[in-house]
Amino acid sequence: MNEITSNALLQLAIDSTNSLSSNDRFDRLLDTVRKTIPCDAVALLSFHQDLLKPIAQQGLTKDTLGRRFYIKDHPRFEVLCNANTAVRFSADSPLPDPYDGLLSDREGDLPVHACMGLPLYFNNNLLGLLTIDSLTPYVFDTIPSRTLDVITSIAANTLNTALMIEQLESKAIHNQNVVNELTQEALNRDGGEIIGNSPSITKLKNEIKIVAPSDFNILIYGETGVGKELVARTLHQYSNRANSALVYVNCAALPENLIESELFGHVKGAFTGAEKNRAGKFLIADGGTLFLDEIGELPLSAQSKILRAIQNNEIQPVGQDKVEQVDVRIFAATNRNLKTEVDEGRFRADLYHRLSVYPVTVDPLRDREGDLELLAGYFIENTRRKLGIAQLKISIDTIAYLLQYDWPGNVRELEHVVSRAALKASARQRNNQVINIDIQDCGNLVSLLKKDLLSSITSTELSSATEQINKENINLRDATDNFQRGLITKVLQQENGNWAATARRLSTDRGNLNRAAKRLDIKVLKVIN
């Protein structure tokens, strides 16, 4: 086994001083490790008290980056986090491997293999782990200790530099005394982290960093299930009110005759049933943030009362003569187009303008290219823990199948599909160490198609589908592919081969359409006259 060459060390040193992004540093680090130590998979994970978060990997399935590994659930990670130097696990180690079934180039359980982990410390603080795996047993046994020491030092410094840059960026928008605690809290809480690297989610994260430290009211737009409440919690965490309360109100669930009492409170005897004084949501949120979910569902009479509270920073509990001052920041969320609601007289224009000082839009899952795999990995790991499964993975074909769907219920629907699929897969593979989620576990996901597109399918095409149904044995996947192939081809012909126009007609992302077309072998030939 060769030690690290001087050129490799020099290149890494140059990269560390260049203005590279964290991802670039991590990718080059892993490239160097793989050139130095032949292996099938290498991963860099950051340490967060009781869990490990993958931040870069090569050789593992893409959904691995969306997983969060709780250390107590994975004995090998527990050993590494308690070690001070590199640990080489024996080929016949009885400890389960957290990457079992996750190698991108191999289906099924891991055979006897070589596994090694390097704990990364800086100033005696554990920053994370570098894990290296090879399908060739005993291949790491002869690596010189000096080689591992150098790799460990470079990896620790690379990770520390990235974390320091991230911390400095956070301090520019938030109080440095609480940001680490809040970030850790968000990582530990179920659903407390915005998962995704798509352009739309990257833009959303940047907008959150820009507007969170201000005291502006924020209107959060998005379809049902996209994660508007998560965005509100994240905005609050990065705001200057993070140490105060974030009070949630579901406006759609408020009875009209109790809205004023719920929001502004009441005094004893104010109405029948008011047996004692009660503080309203505005007073509870004083000094913090009030999140008004489904704001578009409020009746006009309630909207006027909220407007006064926002304009004058004062409330008047039901039955009380005295006006009370409050200091509340408002986040509001809706799946409606409030501008249209204003134009049609169902929402007050003055309240709309008060709320939408800084509107934030959360894009639907179908427009977040590349995020589905990460979200699937995140939900799979959560489900694995809840069900007590040793290892849970999802096949490549199943990911491709999920990518074909429009996800009208967005991220929430994906979570439910993954949870159901995990249950079905675990029941179907009850005696397996590694449970694999396949297409059959996900159920029949049917995209919502526009009526005019359905009507554009010819009777011949429909009769062809009917003939397949009438056969004694049919293949659901083949039937679905044939239908999609016919539909996409039909719309492409109508749009003269324009992929963008076809994607809009089919209400899907252009990238997803291109992937589907490639899988279905649909091509557009350009003819030069």
Image: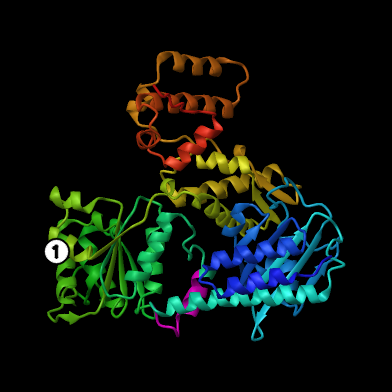
Coordinates of residue 483 in the picture (x, y in percent) = 49, 25
Give the overall secondary structure of the magenta segment: helix
Q: Which residues are magenta?
A: 174-186
In-image side of 304 versus 380 (left or right): left
Coordinates of residue 517 in the picture (x, y in percent) = 50, 33
Q: Could one spot residue 393 in this view of the protein?
A: yes
- Determine crowd level at label 1: few under 14, some 14-19, many 20+ residues with C-alpha closer than 10 A: some
Quadrant occupied by the C terminus: top left
Q: Is 472 in front, or is 143?
A: 143
Coordinates of residue 25 in the picture (x, y in percent) = 58, 68
In-image side of 524 versus 92 (left or right): left
Q: How many marks?
A: 1
Q: Is 402 in front, or is 282?
A: 402
> Where, by quadrant of the figure, is residue 50 drawn?
bottom right
Above or below, 328 against 334 in this view is below
Q: Could one spot residue 54 in this view of the protein?
A: no
Q: Is 439 in front, or is 152?
A: 152
Question: Element at badge 1?
Answer: helix
In-image side of 505 versus 466 (left or right): left
Coordinates of residue 306 in the picture (x, y in percent) = 19, 67
Q: Is 231 in front, or is 43?
A: 43
Above or below, 407 against 258 in this view is above
Q: Amino acid at mark 1?
A: Ser
Above or below, 357 against 168 in this view is above
Image point 44% across, 76% down: which residue? 169
Image point 71% across, 75% down: which residue? 152
Residue placed under numbered mark 1 in the picture: 304
Image point 12% across, 79% down: which residue? 321
Quadrant occupied by the N terminus: bottom right
Q: Is residue 177 magenta?
A: yes
